[in-house]
Image: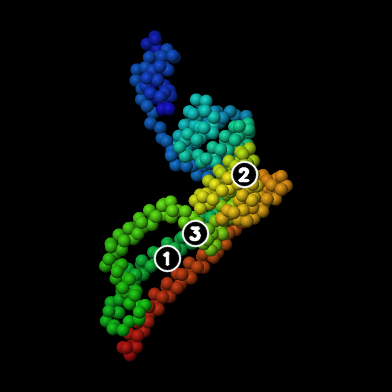
Amino acid sequence: MPYYHYKAKDIDGQNAKGTAEAEDEDDLYLKLRTEGLFLISARAEKRRVRKSPLSYGQLADFSRQLSVMLKSGIRILQAVNILKQREHNAGIAAVYENLYGLLSRGLPLSDALEKQEGVFPPLVVSMMRAGEESGHLGESAARMADYYEREERLRKAVKGAMIYPVFLLIMLNISIIMIFTLILPRFFVLFDAMEDLPLSTRFLMWFSKSLLEYGNICMLILLAVSSVVIYLWHNEKVHLWRDKAALSVPIMGKLLKVIYTARFARTLNSLYGSGVPLISAVNSAFHVLNNRYLEKQFKPVLDDLCNGVSLASALSGIDGLDEKLITGIFIGEESGELEDMLVHVADSFDYEAEAASKNMTVLIEPVMIILIAVLTGYVMLSVMLPIYQYYEMMG
């Protein structure tokens, strides 16, 4: 419902102005009449609406601050109003403003979050709804804060592990372009006078001249290929295939399995521990994995759970989750301590994911360095060999 800045007069002719929420100007007129005011003019407020989802860090901050205020006795409407006033990011402040407006109209927090058009993920909505139903909204918000703080820490660990390899890859590409467009052409003037050149040298000359003479065409071909790759990348079948293939890649596949398992265990623990029914918790946990191949396998799991099969048995056929998760869930179900076991499993896999990301960096760095060394050695030999032959001929 939009806000209107209005100018009005009362029955004594005194001017009045302010801001009010109304469906349209007719609704605003009726609301002001009940207050004894006569509408003169109105202007709808253009409010910035955020449509992109909040980051893990932003969700963690929102949940933590909300949890602290609710546990200290502050009502939800006042808590959101404080968040709105203290937020410096205009986009997030607009989200809090929308939340405040919806809460003022009597909507529960979970429904207000759901109406933000994807800004808050379904996991947050489900957790807040469970907290409202159980009367422990502050505890549910605290669980969400812990969850997203761990997700943010894991994301930063993986991202940090990839910075150096990506930097090396970029430098490798820049070096190749400079070598073939600036350095090698200076030697080719000498090589043109030679009749018998090594095959590697002829290939370098052909590649370098192609970049210099047909650079624009090469760029157009590269853009066309990139467009096709981007289109296929978002195709549903290709998306399913690449999500499945990623789990089979050496080193990277193991890291992804650990990350997915940790995320599933932590999400399931957060939902199940907040009172969400097990079937609904499993359904939500699969949808936060961001892997189509894993999400496609959840329906048989839900069917098994509906038929009375234990969670450990239902998950045993899932390809892409670590087997230690199944063992931990089995022990938790047998001992009646499923929630505590899920916490232990999630913490264990968080540690393994951080360690695996560091190990991946340790392995990728020497591979990139060896690749650069091989390319440099190939170019040097291809250039030096004909020069050596030239001096032999001169001698």
311 lies above or below 228: above
Quarter residue 276 falls in: top right
Disc nearer the start of the sequence (3/2):
3
Q: Distance between the residues labelled 1 and 2?
A: 56 Å
Task: Please say if the residues under marks 1 and 2 sit with CB atoms less than 8 Å apart.
Answer: no
Frontmost of labels 3 and 1 is 3
Return the residue at label 3. 245
Q: For numbered disc 2, what is the local secondary structure?
A: loop
Type of the residue with mark 2: Asn
Mark closer to the chain start, 1 or 2: 1
**For mark 3, does the 10 Å Cα neighbourhood hold few (<14), some (14 to 19), or many (20 or more) residues?**
few
Residue at point 43%, 39% (across, down)? 51
Say which mark, if any, is on residue 141. Answer: none
Q: Which amino acid does label 3 sit on?
A: Ala
Residue farthest to the right, as pictured: 335
Write down the residue under mark 1. Answer: 172
* Residue 291 visible in this rendered orientation of the protein: no
As drawn, is 207 to the left or to the right of 283?
left
Neighbourhood count class around disc 2 (C-alpha, 10 Å): few under 14, some 14–19, many 20 upward: few
Residue 319 pos. (x, y %): 56, 55
Q: Is residue 237 left or right of residue 106?
A: left
Q: What amino acid is at disc 1?
A: Leu
Quadrant in which the N terminus is drawn = top left
**How far is the residue under mark 3 from the one under mark 1?**
26 Å
Q: Residue 307, labelled with which disc?
A: 2
